[in-house]
Image (cartoon, rainbow, N blue to C red):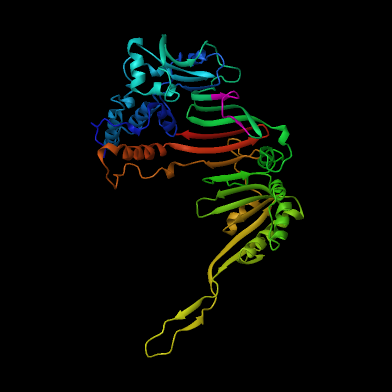
């Protein structure tokens, strides 16, 4: 285990401004002390012509995590020892896990970094202007202002209760531009405008990117959103960004299709795109379809919508696939088309009513071993080597129970898993966090504490003391994982923007 007297960084060689990003994975600070009321005044330091800004209101998030572990599990001797080690860890001689950031700094007030056209501005909470700048250098925070080998030395001056350091041409102190105010419950957030170099890409212009890490009681959100416009000069081209984006933004009624995910499911994953549009784009781009599979592809193009959900009914041993299909005969043709594709891929397939559930259709797929040629070795004094053809045999067999429920094709491994979705008393689980919107992709685990790992187990391997923090972080992640009540991830494309968000809840 780690040596509490060592002076290596608690989180390796990562600079302290990276700690909030790592601590974003930890839910144990649900009852941490909120940031001081003066923290939002960092927004008043936007320079004239700000192109981008990053705010960290809770630099002490890692210390909050350690305090949370102490509150919840500190009566366990092994955890108490772990907490003491984490608080004793140092970075450049400073115990950041114990809120020691050096003389003169008051980082409970937050830190902000602003980018103007020709310069950068760093603003940090301060107690004593005489020692705050030296502490920033010691923490390498002033390295954020360095732009190349010939960068000028930052200029620092107090603006109580903050220390302001700048390089380049930076002037003015203004409030945030329209649309860039801090989100509710923000622990940290950033924004970047269209003027920032590198946001413009061929065929698309990014107008603004925003990101956030927020807390609302026991719920946490970590996400980002990009707003953009497409180049009208490339409109209609098959390989343009707009054409690709059209595939990811299908036009269909929001929430029109029930999830058909069992309410007790421990998790599911969902993707949604315009499948017919994808096939059309591939044709325009010159993709060729083998004649043997062309009829099956045509049926799928007409019958599949592109909505697909992979769910679990009770455990990983009961997977269920839910495919969105077109109304009427076009949707009915999807299952035979899937069988045709499997057969074209070398499988032996069969479609027939299931023996254990005649109302369902079973798709049987056999993986057959090819006819092998076995060569027997020659033996001295005996007849020479000869070849014998080995009989063909089945290596594996897969049987899927299928059932159409409305405009959804259900594929399951057992008859009850498929059949329960057709029962009149079946109630679909609600889509979380916008996952049911058209084009949304997402993953949901309503309860993930069981995946946390083995709590309190002694490590079965030993490493040098200076890298003992790796073992400590593994123990921290196990403890914190046991506090997770659920987690959802969603990616939501729209005609003029894209958004992703990770949400988790703590117990």
The location of residue 102, given as percent across then percent down, is 32, 19
The location of residue 433, given as percent across then percent down, is 58, 35
Q: Residue at x 67, y 63 (%)?
A: 340
- Location of the C terminus by quadrant is top left
Q: Which residue is drawn at 56% across and 45% down?
A: 269
Q: In which quarter of the image is residue 481?
A: top left
Visible residue check, residue 56: yes
Q: In this view, does 194 lie above or below 234?
A: above
Left or right placement of residue 236 versus residue 490 in this view: right
Q: In this view, does 383 lie above or below 434?
A: below
- Pick whichever, 221 or 297, lies toward us: 297
Q: Is residue 9 above or below residue 177?
A: below
Q: Which residue lies furthest to the right in this view?
A: 328
Visible residue check, residue 160: no
The location of residue 150, given as percent across then percent down, is 42, 22
Left or right placement of residue 362 versus residue 68 in this view: right
Asked whether residue 104 is drawn in magenta, I would say no
- Pick whichever, 445 or 140, lies toward us: 140
Picture mark count: 0
Asked whether residue 200 is drawn in magenta, I would say yes
- Pick whichever, 303 or 56, lies toward us: 56
Q: Residue at x 71, y 36 (%)?
A: 234
- Location of the N terminus by quadrant is top left
The location of residue 159, given as percent across then percent down, is 43, 9
Q: Residue furthest front?
A: 150
Q: Please give the range of residues in magenta.
A: 191-201
């Amino acid at each position: 285990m780690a040596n509490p007297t060592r002076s290596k960084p608690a989180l390796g060689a990562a600079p302290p401004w990276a700690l909030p990003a790592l601590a974003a994975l930890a839910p144990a600070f649900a009852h941490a002390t909120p940031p001081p009321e003066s923290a939002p005044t960092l927004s008043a330091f936007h320079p004239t012509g700000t192109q981008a800004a990053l705010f960290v209101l809770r630099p002490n998030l890692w210390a909050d995590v350690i305090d949370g572990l102490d509150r919840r599990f500190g009566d366990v001797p092994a955890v108490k020892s772990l907490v003491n080690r984490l608080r004793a860890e140092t970075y450049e001689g400073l115990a950041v896990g114990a809120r020691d950031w050096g003389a003169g700094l008051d980082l409970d007030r937050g830190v902000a970094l602003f980018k103007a056209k020709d310069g950068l501005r760093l603003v940090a909470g301060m107690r004593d202007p005489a020692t705050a700048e030296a502490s920033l250098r010691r923490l390498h925070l002033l390295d954020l202002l360095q732009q190349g080998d010939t960068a000028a030395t930052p200029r620092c001056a107090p603006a109580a209760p903050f220390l302001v350091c700048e390089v380049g041409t930076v002037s003015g102190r203004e409030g945030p531009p329209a649309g860039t105010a801090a989100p509710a419950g923000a622990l940290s957030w950033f924004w970047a405008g269209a003027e920032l170099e590198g946001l413009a890409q061929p065929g698309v212009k990014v107008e603004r990117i925003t990101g956030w890490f927020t807390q609302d009681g026991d719920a946490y959100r970590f996400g980002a959103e990009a707003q953009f416009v497409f180049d009208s000069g490339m409109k209609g081209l098959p390989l343009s960004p707009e054409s690709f984006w059209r595939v990811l933004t299908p036009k269909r009624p929001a929430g029109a299709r029930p999830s058909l995910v069992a309410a007790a499911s421990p998790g599911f994953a969902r993707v949604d795109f315009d499948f017919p549009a994808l096939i059309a784009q591939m044709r325009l781009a010159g993709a060729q379809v083998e004649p043997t599979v062309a009829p099956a592809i045509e049926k799928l193009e007409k019958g599949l919508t592109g909505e697909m959900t992979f769910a679990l009914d009770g455990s990983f041993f009961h997977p269920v696939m839910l495919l969105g299909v077109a109304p009427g005969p076009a949707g009915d043709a999807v299952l035979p088309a899937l069988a045709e594709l499997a057969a074209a891929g070398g499988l032996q397939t069969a479609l027939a009513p299931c023996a254990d559930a005649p109302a369902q259709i079973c798709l049987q797929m056999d993986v057959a071993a090819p006819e092998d040629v076995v060569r027997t070795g020659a033996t001295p004094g005996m007849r020479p080597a000869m070849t014998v053809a080995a009989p063909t045999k089945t290596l594996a067999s897969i049987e899927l129970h299928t059932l159409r429920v409305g405009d959804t094709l259900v594929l399951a491994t057992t008859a009850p898993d498929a059949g329960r979705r057709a029962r009149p008393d079946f109630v679909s689980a609600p889509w979380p966090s916008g996952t049911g919107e058209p084009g949304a992709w997402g993953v949901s685990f309503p309860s993930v504490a069981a995946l946390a790992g083995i709590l309190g187990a002694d490590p079965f391997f030993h490493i040098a003391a200076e890298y003992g923090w790796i073992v400590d972080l593994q123990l921290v992640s196990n403890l914190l994982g046991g506090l997770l009540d659920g987690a959802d991830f969603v990616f939501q494309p729209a005609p003029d923007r894209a958004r992703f968000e990770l949400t988790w809840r703590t117990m």
